Image (tube, rainbow, N blue to C red):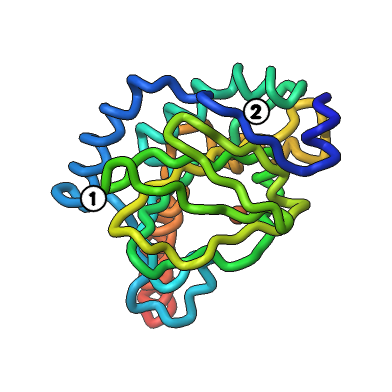
Amino acid sequence: MNHLLEESKYMVVRNAIPAEMFDIFKYYFTFNFFINESYNINAGNLMSNDVVLPFSKSKYADPLVESLLITMTEKMNEYTGKELIPTYSFCRYYENGQYLVKHKDRPSCQYSVTAPLFTMEENEEPWTIFIGDNPIQLNNGDIVIYKGQEVEHWREPYNGELHVQAHLHYVDSKDPEYEKFFYDGRYSCGYDKDKLKREYSKLDMIRFKEIMEEESC
Ligand SMILES: [Fe+2]
């Protein structure tokens, strides 16, 4: 167990992600954002209770960020002094004026990481995240590990053009209370839970129509 992390609820690790990864991130997120548009958006949903406002673009289990989630597990075990199981990854595309509402996270986020992966403007000033009133600034490669379920965290509005942030979430494999959150309830890492939900609701609609037709016969 890492007593500093357990008491402070957060811990900064400098240079945790290898520098050579950032060239890959630069091209990958530029292609994703500007060409493939590989993200979900809450625009049009005024009832959205997303923690990032207004209307940010994001991706659950983005293949590259999900790969980072898995490959960081071993380092995360060292940093936390726990044997962790990945739950899910989330990739957030912050644009000018968007901010992170003060909040705590759900149980799948027992041990979380946030890390900057890409900014449109090279050498942009780090964008402060507040964890339990502590301002934290991260450069490329740096991560903050935090117990998102226990401590409030937020960001003031973003002044830049585009900033991609990875969120990596884990739970303690030895804590029986968290067993149901392994892989965030998915069969394994890699599945897009939002997409599965959409597919299921489509199937439900088809089944609903079938039932209605059967009943009217
Ligand atoms: Fe959070």
The residue at the point 72 percent across, 41 percent down is 10
Q: Nearer the viewer, mark 1 or mark 2?
A: 1
Q: Quadrant of the N terminus?
A: top right
Give coordinates of residue 197: x percent, y percent. Answer: 45, 56
Seen in the image, is 67 located left or right of residue 11? Answer: left
Give coordinates of residue 106: x percent, y percent. Answer: 67, 54
Quadrant of ligand 1: it is: bottom right
Residue 160, label in figure: none
Q: Which residue is mark 1?
A: 33
The residue at the point 43 percent across, 54 percent down is 194
Q: Which residue is mark 2?
A: 85
Give SS at disc 2.
Answer: strand
The residue at the point 82 percent across, 37 percent down is 6
Give coordinates of residue 186: x percent, y percent. Answer: 54, 39
Q: Classify mark 2: residues with Cα within 10 Å, few (<14), some (14-19) or many (20+).
A: many
Give coordinates of residue 21: x percent, y percent. Answer: 35, 24
**Residue 161 in the image: above or below residue 185:** below
Q: Quadrant of the C terminus?
A: bottom left
Q: Distance between the Cα atoms at labels 1 and 2? A: 29 Å
